[in-house]
Image (spheres, helix red, strand yellow):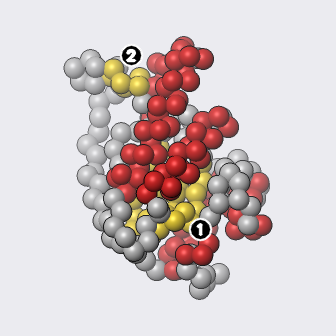
């Protein structure tokens, strides 16, 4: 079945300003819950670890939801193109997902199928486009986003407490847990509000 016609999307304008934190949100293809299994969540965490090593950003908060991701990154004072970071993250996960599905669950491939106007088929893990990208420079705004990120699974009814959700940085904030990925607390501005 062909995909519905695309709605006009607003053009995302990234401001890659050194020193400004970035709140990023991006979704799975057609909001499908491709991240509902530990396997695919692990693929994302692995990609996040590699991307942090490659691009040198600081990770301040994250949550892996069934159909989307929230990240709070700080590039430091060096210039960093967030489009490059996202490409690294998304491409790795897409490649692993498609390879796994082709080998282990080929009947699932139609769920990932994106048919272009000329009939060309591409298998996608992520929604087209750049997602949501907001520059943050105020400690208050940064901490508001951290709280928002950590509360996301609770608001969705996936858990009772943010620390119950294993695929988030919430436990790192409460107990300095380094799994599934550590947080760069040394560069995080102090909380000025509660």
* Image point (47%, 38%), residue name: 92
Up-down relation of residue 73 to residue 112 (above or below): below
Packing grade of label 1 (10 A; few <14, some 14-19, many >=20) is: some
Q: Quadrant of residue 29?
A: top left
Task: Count how many numbered circles sit on residues in the image.
Answer: 2
Please provide percent x and percent y for residue 34.
Answer: 56, 34
Label 1 secondary element: loop
Label 2 secondary element: loop
Residue that label 2 marks: 1
In this view of the protein, which residue sits in the foreground, 194 or 17?
Answer: 17
Please provide percent x and percent y for residue 180.
Answer: 68, 51
Q: Is residue 162 visible?
A: no
Task: Please state, as top left, top right, bottom left or bottom right, where the C terminus lies in the image.
Answer: bottom right
Please provide percent x and percent y for residue 113.
Answer: 41, 23
Decide which of tag 1 and tag 2 comes sooner along the chain. 2
* Image point (45%, 53%), residue name: 54
Packing grade of label 2 (10 A; few <14, some 14-19, many >=20) is: few
* Image point (34%, 52%), residue name: 83
Looking at the image, the residue that sits furthest to the bottom is 192
Please provide percent x and percent y for residue 182.
Answer: 65, 60
Residue that label 1 marks: 184
* Image point (62%, 72%), residue name: 185
In this view of the protein, which residue sits in the foreground, 122 or 182?
Answer: 182
């Amino acid at each position: 079945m062909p995909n519905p016609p695309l709605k006009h999307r607003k053009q995302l304008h990234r401001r890659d300003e050194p020193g400004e934190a970035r709140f990023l949100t991006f979704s799975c293809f057609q909001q499908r819950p491709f991240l509902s299994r530990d396997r695919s969540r692990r693929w994302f965490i692995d990609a996040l670890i590699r991307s942090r090593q490659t691009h040198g950003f600081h990770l301040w908060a994250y949550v892996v939801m069934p159909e989307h991701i929230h990240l709070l990154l700080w590039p430091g004072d060096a210039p960093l193109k967030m489009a490059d970071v996202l490409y690294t993250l998304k491409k790795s996960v897409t490649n692993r997902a498609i390879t796994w599905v082709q080998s282990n669950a080929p009947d699932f491939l139609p769920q990932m199928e994106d048919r272009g106007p000329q009939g060309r088929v591409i298998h996608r893990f992520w929604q087209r486009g750049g997602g949501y990208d907001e520059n943050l420079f105020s400690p208050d705004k940064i901490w508001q986003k951290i709280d928002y990120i950590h509360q996301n699974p609770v608001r969705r009814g996936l858990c009772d407490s943010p620390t119950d959700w294993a695929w988030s940085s919430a436990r790192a904030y409460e107990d300095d847990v380094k799994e599934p990925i550590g947080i760069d607390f040394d560069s995080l501005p102090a909380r000025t509000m509660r």
